[in-house]
Amino acid sequence: MLERLLLAIAVTFSVYLSVDGEFDKTPIPSVLQLPTFPEQNLSPWQ
């Protein structure tokens, strides 16, 4: 069961790397940048 979990993580990580390499702008990096500057992200909604 642990081997399947590690395999699933490896496949997901490899797919993420391949998608990130094909597309420069992916939703995942933008989401990771949200907590970095919360004030700039909240100001348009205020």
Image (tube, helix red, strand yellow):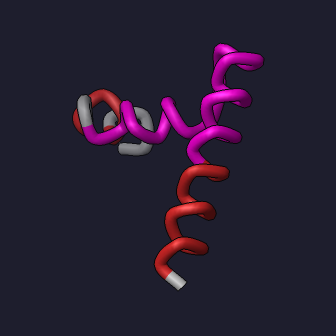
Residue at image location 25% in from the left, 30% down from the top: 37
The quarter of the displayed image where residue 7 is located: bottom right
* Magenta span includes 44: no
Residue at image location 64% in from the left, 25% down from the top: 20
- Depth check: 30 or 42 in front? 30
Q: Main secondary structure of the magenta part?
A: helix
- Depth check: 16 or 23 in front? 16
- Residue 34 picture location, percent across and down: 37, 37
Residue at image location 66% in from the left, 51% down from the top: 11
- Residue 35 picture location, percent across and down: 28, 41
| 9 sits to left or right of 40 | right
> Which segment is the magenta one?
13-35
- Residue 21 picture location, percent across and down: 67, 17
| 20 sits to left or right of 46 | right
- Residue 26 picture location, percent across and down: 65, 29
Where, quadrant-wise, is the C terminus in this rendering? top left
| 38 sits to left or right of 24 | left
